[in-house]
């Protein structure tokens, strides 16, 4: 019945560990993205949802790679293109559009994909880091960010299976 409070939840590691130890947990942060990410990581997903996430990520990745191969422009632009190589920017916008379609039909899976997507945006950008806007050149091949998204989904499911063995009760 003990509580654990993490007032600067960040990506949720402390909350996840607290839940795993059977504690009631609460976390907050000034960053809404951090709160959403920590909630994703600290919530056990049943195996059917894990499979649904992997299936959705695979479909989104395939659709995005198809869009890249055909050199299709996305229906909507996001962010500021100056921070990306032109082909990377178009791929990110197309990938984001594919995720939006998932959000419209399956909100929990779409939310997870958006959070995974958020983890690759800065990595794909010309920014040195999230907090440092100094530009650097990155050599990213076509289709790279789509493949990163799929790998992130696979990594999340592996972590889910490792952290939340079947039948483990959580509070």
Image (cartoon, rainbow, N blue to C red):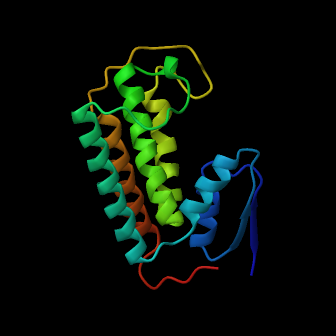
Q: Is residue 139 above or below residue 10?
A: above
Answer whether residue 123 is visible to the viewer in this image: yes
| Lateral position of residue 60 relative to residue 84, left or right | left
Q: In this view, does 118 lie above or below 14?
A: above
The residue closer to the viewer here, 169 or 120, is 120
Answer whether residue 12 is visible to the viewer in this image: no
The picture quadrant where one finds residue 1 is bottom right
Q: Residue at x 53, y 57 (%)?
A: 111
Residue 149 in the image: x percent, y percent?
A: 37, 46
The residue closer to the viewer here, 50 or 6, is 50
| Lateral position of residue 97 relative to residue 11, left or right | left
Q: Residue at x 52, y 50 (%)?
A: 115
| Lateral position of residue 120 relative to residue 16, left or right | left
Q: Is residue 100 above or below residue 94?
A: below
The residue closer to the viewer here, 47 or 92, is 92
Residue 68 in the image: x percent, y percent?
A: 27, 34
Residue 171 in the image: x percent, y percent?
A: 64, 79
Q: Residue at x 31, y 20 (%)?
A: 139
Tally of marks = 0
Residue projecting furthest to the front: 75
The picture quadrant where one finds residue 53 is bottom left
Residue projecting furthest to the left: 69
């Amino acid at each position: 019945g003990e509580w654990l409070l993490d007032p600067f939840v960040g990506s949720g590691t402390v909350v996840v560990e607290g839940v795993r130890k059977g504690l009631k947990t609460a976390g907050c942060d000034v960053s809404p993205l951090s709160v959403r990410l920590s909630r994703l990581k600290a919530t056990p997903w049943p195996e059917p949802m894990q499979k649904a996430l992997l299936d959705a990520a695979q479909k989104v990745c395939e659709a995005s790679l198809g869009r890249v191969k055909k050199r299709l422009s996305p229906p909507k632009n996001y962010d500021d293109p100056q921070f990306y190589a032109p082909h990377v920017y178009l791929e990110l916008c197309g990938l984001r559009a594919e995720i939006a379609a998932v959000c419209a039909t399956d909100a929990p899976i779409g939310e997870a994909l958006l959070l995974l997507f958020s983890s690759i945006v800065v990595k794909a950008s010309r920014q040195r880091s999230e907090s440092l806007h100094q530009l650097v050149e990155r050599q990213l091949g076509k289709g790279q960010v789509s493949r990163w998204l799929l790998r992130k989904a696979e990594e999340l499911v592996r972590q889910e299976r490792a952290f939340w063995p079947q039948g483990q009760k959580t509070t």
